[in-house]
Image (cartoon, rainbow, N blue to C red):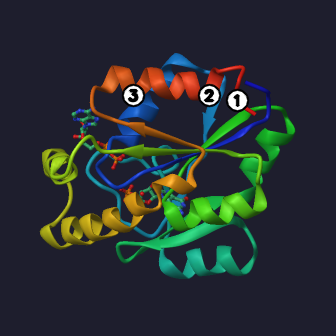
């Protein structure tokens, strides 16, 4: 993998992006995860500046207006965005940066960083997303319904991405992501 690369990881809520990323980052300290800003309240156990920068809507709006975000989108009634400066600095320093973002944000990055590697994570079968979201046990019924509705739209766009990876067996999916990131055949 060349240095200073931007990697976009997208996939429906509950597909296992966070789980895969935790393993990937533990195994490859040379990869850096961009920490997003969100208006969503923290889930139990989530820590400010580690999992997200948790901000209110007026601060988020200010960041959008000041051009502080590389991309941003609304998702299930909350706003999410990627702080521009840390990502641009890391890329400039030759570091590889991963953005774990939803579809609308991935589409924005495709315009501004056409060389970014875009990876989409798919569930193995229908029904599995709902099972995983419920097993995570952190979303209300209304939030689950919104996330499952959005999942259909996102999965329909999977082919827009450079690579599609099915997260059935976790280790296999992790291996597939590693192959995609580190294969010398990748452009
Ligand atoms: P996302 O970040 O995409 O919303 P999470 O990483 O939070 O998804 O995973 C959602 C739930 O699914 C978690 O409870 C996680 O432990 C579980 N999970 C993730 N990957 C797998 C897998 N390959 N097989 C079974 N369960 C999984
Ligand atoms: P969650 O609330 O489950 O943490 O995240 C909801 C969705 O927002 C996920 O699909 C996640 O990938 C996406 N997301 C997280 N951070 C960002 C971001 O900075 N920008 C965009 N566009 N989406 C994000």
Q: Residue 171 placed where, x, y %?
A: 35, 20
Report the quarter where the N terminus lies: top right
Q: Is residue 186 above or below residue 112?
A: above
Q: Dots 1 and 2: beta carbons under 8 Å? A: yes
According to the picture, the residue beneath numbered tag 2 turns out to be 181
Q: Mark 2 packing: few (<14 Cα in 10 Å), some, or many (20+)?
A: some
Q: Tell me where residue 151 appears, x and y as whole percent.
A: 33, 62
Residue at the image position 76 percent from the left and 54 percent from the top? 113
Quarter of the image holding residue 40?
Answer: bottom left
Q: Quadrant of residue 65?
A: bottom right
- As drawn, the label of residue 136 is none
- Residue visible at 32% across and 65% down? 152
- Crowding near pointer 1: few (<14 within 10 Å), some, many (20+)? few
Disc 2 C-beta below 8 A from ligand 2? no
Question: Which residue is depicted at the point 15% across and 52% down?
Answer: 127
Taking 68 as reference, is 29 left or right? left
Is disc 2 placed on a helix, strand or loop? helix
Q: Which residue corresponds to mark 1?
A: 186
| Foreground pick, 69 / 24 | 24
At numbered mark 3, what does the secondary structure look like: helix, strand or loop? helix
Can residue 54 be seen by looking at this rendering?
Answer: no
Q: Which residue is mark 3?
A: 173
Nearer the viewer's eye, disc 1 or disc 2?
A: 1
How far apart are the alpha carbons under marks 3 and 1? 18 Å
Mark 3 Cβ and ligand 1 under 8 Å apart: yes
First in sequence, mark 1 or 2: give its number. 2
User: Furthest-front residue in view?
Assistant: 159
Q: Residue at x 76, y 34 (%)?
A: 187
36, above or below 182, in the image? below
- What is the C-alpha distance between the residues marked 1 and 2? 8 Å
Q: Position of residue 69 (x, y in %)?
A: 68, 66
Residue 143 appears in the picture as rendered: yes
């Amino acid at each position: 993998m060349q240095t200073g690369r931007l990697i976009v990881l997208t996939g429906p809520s509950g597909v296992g992006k966070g789980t895969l990323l935790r393993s990937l980052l533990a195994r490859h300290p040379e990869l850096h995860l961009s920490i997003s800003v969100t208006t969503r309240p923290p889930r139990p156990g989530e820590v400010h500046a580690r999992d997200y920068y948790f901000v209110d809507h007026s601060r988020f709006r200010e960041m959008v207006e000041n051009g502080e975000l590389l991309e941003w989108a609304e998702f299930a009634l909350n706003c999410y965005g990627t702080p521009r400066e840390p990502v641009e600095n890391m890329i400039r320093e030759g570091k590889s940066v991963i953005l774990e973002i939803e579809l609308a944000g991935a589409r924005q990055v495709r315009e501004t960083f056409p060389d970014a590697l875009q990876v989409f994570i798919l569930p193995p079968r229908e029904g599995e997303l709902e099972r995983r979201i419920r097993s995570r046990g952190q979303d209300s019924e209304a939030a689950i319904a919104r996330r499952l509705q959005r999942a259909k739209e996102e999965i329909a766009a999977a082919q827009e991405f450079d690579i599609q990876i099915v997260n059935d067996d976790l280790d296999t999916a992790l291996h597939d992501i590693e192959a995609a990131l580190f294969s010398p055949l990748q452009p």
